[in-house]
Amino acid sequence: MMIGIDFGTSNSSVAIYRPTGAEIIETIDGADYMPSTVADTADGLVAGDAANRVMLRHPEYTFRNIKRYLGVDYNEQEHGSFHLTEGPDGKVWWNGRNGPLSGPVLVAEVLKLLLLAAEVRLGRKPTGAVIAVPVDFREPQRNAILEAAAIAGLNPKKTHLFEEPMCAALAYNIDKPKFAHVLVYDFGGGTFDGTILKIKDGVMKALGMSGSAQIGGADFDQRLADYAVDKFFEKEGEDLRAHQKQMVGILAAAERAKKVLSRDTSADIQEPNVAFQKSGLASLDVTVQRSEFEDMTEDLVIRTMASVNAALDQAGMTAERVDGVLLVGGQSRMPMIRDVLAGMFGEKKIIKDGPRAEFAVAQGAAIRAAELDGRLKRSVMQRLVPSSIGIRVAGGGYRSFIKRGETFPIRREQVLRAAYEDQRELRLIVVQGEDPEAALNTEVCRFDVPVADASARVPVMLDVDQNGRLIVWIAGKVVYGELEDAA
C-alpha cells in the first residue's frame, strides 16, 4: 500500500487511505505530526521530538527549517546562519559534529520515522509514497526530496511528487458544480502557495499559481521572538540574541504564543532564567496583544496576498470569479488572514467544512497514493510547470524551451549550433527561472558536447514528465533524468 507524506518546514505528517477516507497516522510518539527537526548527536542523527529535546542542550547541532534551504545554492540563501555551510555541490549543507551534512541526508531522517509509523500501522512496509511539494519547488529541490526518499528506503520507482495545493484540493473533495474556480491558500511553516484551480467535468486544472519557499509560519514566530527580546532589552539592558540556547526556548515560547493568539486577544511569551543579572537570574515574561502581533506581521500577510493576485493574473481571473477559498496549513488559522481573505473574496466563499488545515496536504497525498495504487479512480489533473526551463549556450545566449505556467507533461525540442567558427565543444547549461538573460536562474545541469565544426547542429529536447520531473535529451540520448513507465 502506498502512503501520503507531507514533509513540512516545521512539522511533517503521514496518512493512508481507507475505504472510510484518508486518515492521519500517529507517529511513534503518539502524535498526529512530528517536528521536522534533526539533531546530530554523539550517537548519530535523530529526528522529531528526540531532536527537539537535543535542541535544548545542543542548539548548534540541531537543525530546523531544513525545507527552506533544501536544494538551494549556497550563494542564493537569504539568511546567514551558523548552521549552514557550502557543500561540495555548491548547495546549502549543515554543519554537523563531524563535518557537513547534506539536505537529503537530514530529510531522510524525518522520512524514516514517518515510514516507521506507517509500517507499524499497516503491519508491513509501504510499497511507495506520494510526497507533497510546494508548487514553486524547482528541479534541484525536487531532486533533493527524491534523493532523501531513496536514502530513507523508498523505492524510487514508487515515489511520486505532487503539488501541495492539488493534494489539499483532493482532501477537500472539491468536485461539486458550485466550485468551478477555487483558490487554495496554503500557508505552512516555511512556504506559501496561492493556486487557482478550475474544476469541470471531473478534471482539475491549475490555472495560476504563485508562492514562495521563503515565507511561512516560522517568520511569524521570529517576529514574536524579536518583539519579546526587544522588550527584555528595554527592561534589563541585555540582548538575548547573543545566547543560542536561550533563543531556542524563546522561539518555542513565541510559537506557543502565536497559536494562543489565533483564539485569544492576548498571549504571554515566557521563558525562565534567560540571563544573569546583578539581582540574580532574570526571566523573560512579555505579554503581546493580538493587534500588536498583527501590526508586526502585516507585511508578511501582504506578501501572501501579492502572490494570490499574481495567481489570479496568471489565471486571467478576478476575485469575483472565485467560488471557494480553501485554507490550508497551520498559519492560515491566523484571524487576520481569514479577515483579509474574507474582505477580498467574501466570507461565504471561505470553505469551512473539510479536513483540519494542518493535515489537508497529507490526507490529499494519501488519496493520490490510493489513485496511483488503483484503489481509487484516478482524478484527472492538469498541472503547471512552476518556472521556465531553458538552455544557456556558452557564448551563444539563452533560449527558453518551456514557459512557466504551461501544462505538463510537455516536450520541446530545439536545434543548437556553435557560437563561433573554430568552436569544437558546445557547453549546454540547463537553467530554470524567469530571468530573460538567465544570469539569475537556477542551474540544473550542464554538458559539454563535441562538435565537428561551426556548421554542426545539436538537437536538444527538454521533457517534463507526468510527475513533474525533468528529462534532458541530447542527440536522441537521455543525459539527465530517467524515463519511467506510466504510473
Image (cartoon, rainbow, N blue to C red):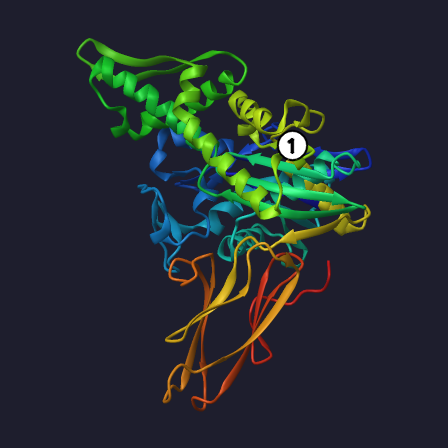
Q: List the residue tagged with mark 1.
A: 325
Q: Is residue 354 left or right of residue 134?
A: right
Three-letter residue code for mark 1 = Val
Q: Quadrant of residue 398?
A: bottom left
Relative vertical location of residue 160 with respect to residue 332 in this rendering, above or below? below
Q: Position of residue 344 (x, y in %)?
A: 58, 29
Q: Residue at x 49, y 56 (%)?
A: 140
Q: Residue at x 31, y 13 (%)?
A: 283
Q: Quadrant of residue 479?
A: bottom right
In the foreground, 346 or 292 = 346
Q: Is residue 423 left or right of residue 326?
A: left
Q: How many marks?
A: 1
Q: Position of residue 465 (x, y in %)?
A: 64, 62
In the foreground, 96 or 411 = 411
Q: Position of residue 199 (x, y in %)?
A: 74, 43
Relative vertical location of residue 275 with respect to residue 219 in this rendering, above or below? above
Q: Quadrant of residue 277?
A: top left
Q: Is residue 175 left or right of residue 302?
A: right
Relative vertical location of residue 338 with respect to residue 482 in this rendering, above or below? above
